[in-house]
Image (cartoon, grey):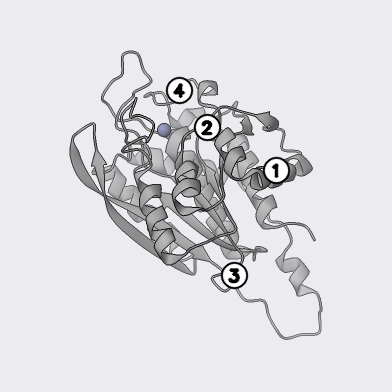
Amino acid sequence: MLLPLLGTHCGTGASARSRPEFDGEATLALAKTQTDFGPRVPGSEAHSQAINWMEAFLQPLASLVQRQPFQIWNPHYEESADGVNLIASFYPEKTQRIMLCAHFDTRPEASAESPPVLEPIDGAVDGAAGTAIMLQMATILSEHEPAYGVDIVLFDGEDIGLTGAGPEYQHWFQGSRHFSSFARQADYKPWFAILVDLVGDKQADYYQEPISLQYAPDVVRKVWDVAAALGVTQFKQSRGQYVYDDHWILNRDAGIPSIDITESISDYAHWHTREDTWDKLSAESLAAVGKVLVGVLYPEE
Ligand SMILES: [Zn+2]
C-alpha cells in the first residue's frame, strides 16, 4: 500500500508505523472455516478445499503468493498424496525480512488416544489456530506497513509421521523439509522465523521452548520481551518442554534462526485426539499470540 505523496503534512511515516490491533474474533472465525472443511489430511477433499481457500484469501492481500508443490508420503495409509506449501510475500522491496509460519495439515491418526485410533482429527489447536493467526496477520500486513518485509509460509505435511518414528522423525515435518531445501538453494535468509503451532486453546500458556532457546536465543528473548512490554501474561518467562516441530528443521536444515510459539504438549489434554475441536479455541487466547506478533512487526519508535 502506498502512502499519498502530495500535501504539506509531514511525518506520514509515523502513522504508517502505528501499531494495528489484532482481532481475535476474526481469527477464531478463520479457524472455524478450516475445521468446517473437516480434517485436512493430505489427499483428502478437505485438504484441497482448505488450500484453495487459503490461496484465494491471501491472493488480494500479498504482493506475491506462491505454491510450492511436493509429494507427501503418508506412512499410516502407505501411499503418497499431493502436498503444497503456500508462501505469501509482503513488501518484497524491504530487504530485512521476518518469516512467519504455521502448518495447516492435520493428523490422520488420533494417536494420543488409548488405544490409538486410525481416524483423522479436526486439528483446531493443532493446525487451524496457527494458520488462522497467519491469515489474520496477512490482513493486517495488507493494511499497515510493518517495519520489515514479511514472508508468511503455510506448511503442509507436518503432522503425518508415525508415533515413535525415531531420532530423525522420519515422515514428520515434510513441508518444512521441502521448504528448507528450496531455501538453501535460493539462499533465502530472513532475519529470523517465528513458527506458531499448538496455540489458542482457552488455557494456553507459552513457555520458552528449548530447541528455540538452543538455536535462536536472541529471537526468544526479543519475542518474550515484546510480550512482557505488552502485558501479555500467557507468555511465561521460563523454560518449557521440548517440542520437535517445523522450527527444528528450519534451524537445522535451512540455517534460519527459528523459534516456536507453542504450548507444552502435556498442557493440552486434547493433543492428537478427536477432541481437538473448534470449541477448545478462544478468541482471547488467539489474540494473545497475534498481539505479540504485531508487537514484533510494528515496534514503537
Ligand atoms: Zn500435531
Name the residue at the top extreme. 114
Q: What element carries label 4?
A: loop
Q: What residue is at 57 percent from the left and 64 percent from the top?
A: 142
Ligand 1 visible in quadrant:
top left
Q: Distance between the residues labelled 3 and 1?
A: 23 Å
Tell me the amino acid under the disc marked 2. Answer: Leu
Q: Position of residue 97 (x, y in %)?
A: 58, 62
Tell me the amino acid under the disc marked 4. Answer: His
Q: What residue is at 18 percent from the left and 40 percent from the top?
A: 79
Q: Do the residues labelled 4 and 1 touch (CB within 8 Å)?
A: no
| Residue marked by disc 1 | 221
Q: Specify which label sits upstream in the sequence, 2 or 1.
A: 1
| Residue marked by disc 2 | 281
| Residue marked by disc 3 | 95
Q: What residue is at 43 percent from the left and 29 percent from the top?
A: 277
Bin the neighbour count of mark 1 within 10 Å (Cα to Cα): few under 14, some 14-19, many 20 and up.
Answer: some
**Which image quadrant for residue 146?**
bottom right
